[in-house]
Image (cartoon, rainbow, N blue to C red):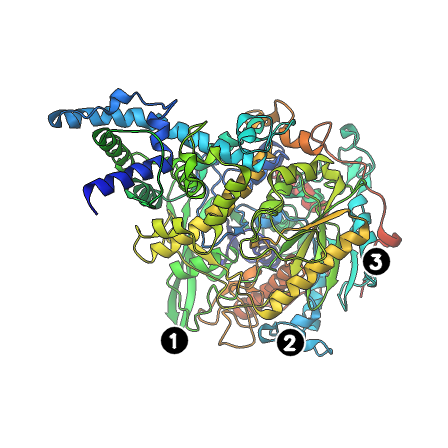
Amino acid sequence: MSNSTAAVGRRAFLARLGLLGAAVGVGGLLPRSALAPPAAAAQNDVLPGLVDLLRPVLAELARDTLNGLSVFALPGPDPYSAAQGTPSDTPGAMEAGTTDFLIDALDNFVPFPDQLAKPIGAALATGLADTGIELPGTELLPAELGTLDKALRALLESDATLPLSFPIAGMLNLLATQVNPLAVNGAFLSPFARLSYAEKARAFQLLEGPDSDLVALLDVRFPEPLKNSVSGLLKFVGGALIEFASFGSYTEYAVFDARNKQLTARPVGWELTGYQPDGPVEGWDEFIGYYQGRTEVRD
Amino acid sequence: MRDVIIIGAGGGGPVVAKELAAQGLDVLVLEAGPRHAKPREQWTSFENDANNPLSGYFRLGPTDRSEPAWFREWSQNSFVWQLSGVGGTTQHFYGNYPRAYPGVFNDYDKADRNEYDVNHRFPFSYAEMVPYFEWVEATAPVMTAAMGTKEAVFFRGCETLGLPVQTTKTTLAPSYRPQENAILQPGGNAGRTSDRNLLNYPDATGCTFCGYCFQGCMRPVGAPRNQFAKRSTDNSYVPMALTADVWAPAGRPVDLLTDAYVTRIHTERRAGALTATGVTWRDNASGEERREDAKVVVMAGGCTENPRLWFNSGLPNPNDWVGRGYTDHFFDWVIGSFDEYTGNPKGVGSSARLDFPPYGGLENVGLPPALNAFSTTLSDSGIRGQYGNGRGPTGPWDGPAGRVMGPELKELVAGGLDRLLSVLVITDDDVEPDNRVVTSALPADENGPIPKVTFQHRARTARTTRNREFMARKAAELLRGAGAKKVFRIDWAPLILHVQSSMRMGESERDSVLDSGAEARAVRGLFIADNSALANSLGGPNPTLTTQALATRTAEKIFERYFGGDPWVRGGSPVVSTDPRISARLGELGL
């Protein structure tokens, strides 16, 4: 592969992850000047600063991506739901705090071994994913791209724990751009968040399917027997993201005061389902007797 | 040197502990997770606070909820619902105590005998098990369940299927009935009012129909721990084990240590036989390791953890069956939408069932909103209307099976949760060697290499697959008969929640880990006393009663084989776990 082909593939990959757009696209979070290639001698001094600038970009990209996932689980009266073509008048996941629920779980509680998260992060850092798809979008000078790329690699290879929300978001965005290459540009930071509901479903179809390209792509980076484990884990993650986002959307998460173990407002999920109209109970007047009057059986 | 060390205080371990404590043995119980001794301070009844598998108070992890849960590898879209803590998974169960079908025992000779998992039967007769069923039924105690509306709706559906009502403890043929459950039935104001001021013990006794079984039972308010309605072992057997001196003439209370993660079983060769000698455990908080010796060691950490501990202890596995033959009732989920009130999710999680030997069974289930959402989105058939993931079976339900999620779920629940009724499809599934626990290649945790649970869910045996399809159709027909306007089949991905037989006892030493006394074939003095010891999936009935009956029998075997004692079940009469002497002593102990 020639250097120029690699650069094109790399640019495409960063665009598909959502990073290119989130960092320097329209509405991007990183000043373009930060990517000005430093003089070779100064590179070691500049890079750490750029890594620090990049960290919140990744966090925002992850949040935006998970917004797209949350409304997939429970649409509401928000722009993300409108963008996926399922607007709703009643509260949804954005009101239920589902994105925070997911980020909190992924970054703080999923007991995912760091030894595994890092190689997955590294796979995202080094993947080329040269699909031959023409990707319209941000024009970056090769040198600027190189700086961004170096900063991403430095961040992913640093000793700091990688928030799991980033590789999850990266995965969803890769799938999103496989489903619809045009999703590399548009409203929001995340390609996944730009998809229609049907396109999001198609992304999960790719993830859950037995011959997921993404699984194959990431597996390449692991030796056996880990390779098989990662492949299985990604299939698990595919299901779990939907199930966990749906569960979270209907819980009390957003309005639970953990210190006092009480609710500060009525949960969205309760409102939508009519659950416990007067709040938590000690019991219900629901006992209507014994079937056929029988209170005991014996052989 | 203890007489007996029991690893795990879930559904099975406390049974052996209580029985041997009553015989005066020196018993130590080690529980890896928390002890919820003050549920009114430690619990709520909220779904995320309770049931979030990562951070809820019912999770697989240490007491300190700021610490991560314990990671387990599942190499497929699935959910293995493990809980640590005193009570184990009985903390969130529904208290259903049906007996195993007679067809899964080795003396069964009815016309349909070859329709069961005949290669993996119990190595003794149903008749031999009956006294142990009766003993546990009297101890828990087990009663005929009261009805709420969701039971009445379910029965209305059952009445259209041409089946009789079962009025015996033993299931003899396809039939339906109220659950026989380990729930104290409603007394006083319980079930008759929603006014919390009237629901304090003893004005209310037994089940108040709160609908919070899955979030833990701590009602009625003010009741002694052993008078809470649901007989999870933290409310039944554990209180008995801790107070054995007041209710058993020669009783000796057990010692219970929590946050004590057993990492190794020790053995040595004695008279030519490999023999268990004790255990090492690690304190979750301090990381300190401790070791104690015992004449007998009992494993009761569950179907996933027992194989792990076996492998990590380097114990022999001569026939390669440790961890194999894991059964899970290959659940499915069918949900009906009604134009009328269904009573969902009030009352005990499930108080009605339909048994259909030799296929499996059905239960009605009430769920609060988030668990309902989880249940409609756990699928192996993609998303309804979008993709089928290579499956999406059709039948007497509406459209293809698959996830009901997003806008469709929002619309489904908009009529109110109490217009829905769900049916759990329970499959009589075969013991299969490739459904198993192995040691994961992923990094070890602080307690050693972790387990990996593998289910070949798309390649189950023809009988298992047939049974599941048969029961899913029955569920849909039942809901239609009850008046459902819409019926959805989810085609669940494996929800591994009824767990059985991963360390199975069996007739043949070629495909079982345990002999007919639940003692390991390869290690003397090492017994197993939880669901993993079961020979098979029981034909479909919920496993707790059979596990506890078997654990009672195992306690006798231990007493006979290692302490020169006599069995007590056939000639004795059990003390009920609600006995006021237990309540009084719990009060003295501040429990």
Towards the viewer: B298 or B568: B298
- Quadrant position of the C terminus of chain B in the picture: top right
Q: How many marks?
A: 3
- Quadrant position of the N terminus of chain B in the picture: bottom left
Q: Position of residue B92 (x, y in %)?
A: 62, 46
Residue B272's label in the rendered image is 1
Residue B160's label in the rendered image is 3
Residue A142's label in the rendered image is none
Q: Secondary structure at mark 2?
A: loop
Residue B106's label in the rendered image is 2
Residue B166 image-quadrant placement: bottom right
Q: Chain of mark 2?
A: B
Whichever of labels 3 and 2 marks the residue nearer the N terminus, that label is: 2
**Residue type at mark 3?**
Thr
Q: Tell if the residue under mark 3 belongs to the same chain as the one under mark 1.
A: yes
Q: Chain of mark 3?
A: B
Q: Position of residue A261 (x, y in %)?
A: 59, 28
Q: Chain of mark 1?
A: B
Decide: few, some or many residues near mark 2? Use Cα within 10 Å; few <14, some 14-19, many ≥20: some
